[in-house]
Amino acid sequence: MRRGGAVSALPAASAEDMPERPTAYQFLLRDKRAIVGMAVLGLIVISTVCASFISPYDPLSQEFDILQPPSPVHPLGTDDLGRDLFTRILYGARVSLFVGVVTVTISMMLGVAMGILAGYYGGWIDIFFMRYIDLQWAFPNFIIAVYLVAVFGTGLANVIVAISLAFLDDFARITRGMVLSIREEEYVLAARSIGASGPVIMLRHILPNAIAPIIVQATLSVSFAILAEAGLSFLGLGVKASTPTWGLIISDARSFFTRAWWLGIYPGLAIMITVLSINFLGDALRDVLDVRND
């Protein structure tokens, strides 16, 4: 800047002087919700993987006295068929977590594909996909899952398909909204001007810039899928009756709430703790990936 015939200049800041922006992982480590969520969720995953080492009992074995209260031998008591409840909850977590992760993966793949095609191409493709999504949006996800299980039948594979189809509308709407704004960005227009094809633009330029809200939605949807599987199993529309799942354990405990309170309380706590830990992690990811926080 020129003042009184002299030129004064401020020293230019070097790259070393610029503060380094913390990474997303560092942000997560500073968030107490993320730390609690990851710690609890990690403990649950480790417990399910090592269930055979943690508990010496078979989840289907009926060799004990029925309706025993919690004791050192059976930490969470036994059920009405003489099965160890702690063991059944451990093995039930395998089914719940498996269903949650697999269904969300399928829902995300289908929903993102529908949303990105509808948002980028528009026209009749947008109308076709979005009218279907609007129709599905008119009904609660769980009601759709119940209807689909009634059509396909019970069983683990059918439950996964039903929950996956029931939750894909959330991913489709989020992806389409992001694509509608990103496709008008200068770098997308530049890629289009040099002859890049539609699939290349969508995969290389649009999808990576729209992935943040999709990741957050996927994290939160895992907890919704776990609740949906538990609800279907509670209604008798889930997996086989011989498979230990949290919803089925609570369903079997309905007739014994007054006599054996532990049959329904402990699997309910397992569902609550798992869902809360996933939601804590999802909320932290939402804050970390929100561009408005930069």
Image: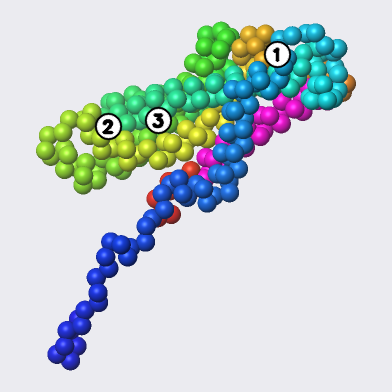
SS under mark 1:
loop
Residue 172's mark? 3
Which element is circle 3 on?
helix
| Residue at position x 61%, y 12% in the image | 239
Residue in front for this viewpoint, 47 or 36: 47
Q: Is residue 37 above or below residue 225?
A: below
Picture quarter with the N terminus = bottom left
Q: What's the CA distance linking mark 1 and mark 3?
A: 39 Å
N-term-proximal mark, 1 vs 3: 1
Q: Nearer the viewer, residue 108 or 16?
A: 16
Residue 280: % across, % down: 57, 41
The percent coordinates of residue 232 (x first, y second) are 62, 18
Q: Is residue 178 above or below residue 290?
A: above
Which residue is the site of mark 1? 59
User: Is the magenta region chiefly helix, strand or loop?
Assistant: helix
Determine which quarter of the picture holds residue 275: top right
The single residue placed furthest to the right in the displayed view is: 259
Between circles 1 and 3, the one closer to the viewer is 1
Q: Is residue 62 left or right of residue 34?
A: right
The amino acid at mark 3 is Ala
Whole-percent x, y for residue 42 in the image? 58, 33
The range drawn in magenta is: 260-284
Residue 203 disc label? 2
| Mark 3 or mark 2, whichever is nearer to me | 2
Residue 146 left/right relative to 191:
right
One can see residue 67 in this view:
yes
Which of the marked residues, 1 or 2, is nearer the chain's N terminus? 1
Per the rendering, the mark at residue 136 is none
Tag 1–tag 2 contact (CB < 8 Å): no
Q: CA distance from mark 1 to mark 2?
A: 45 Å
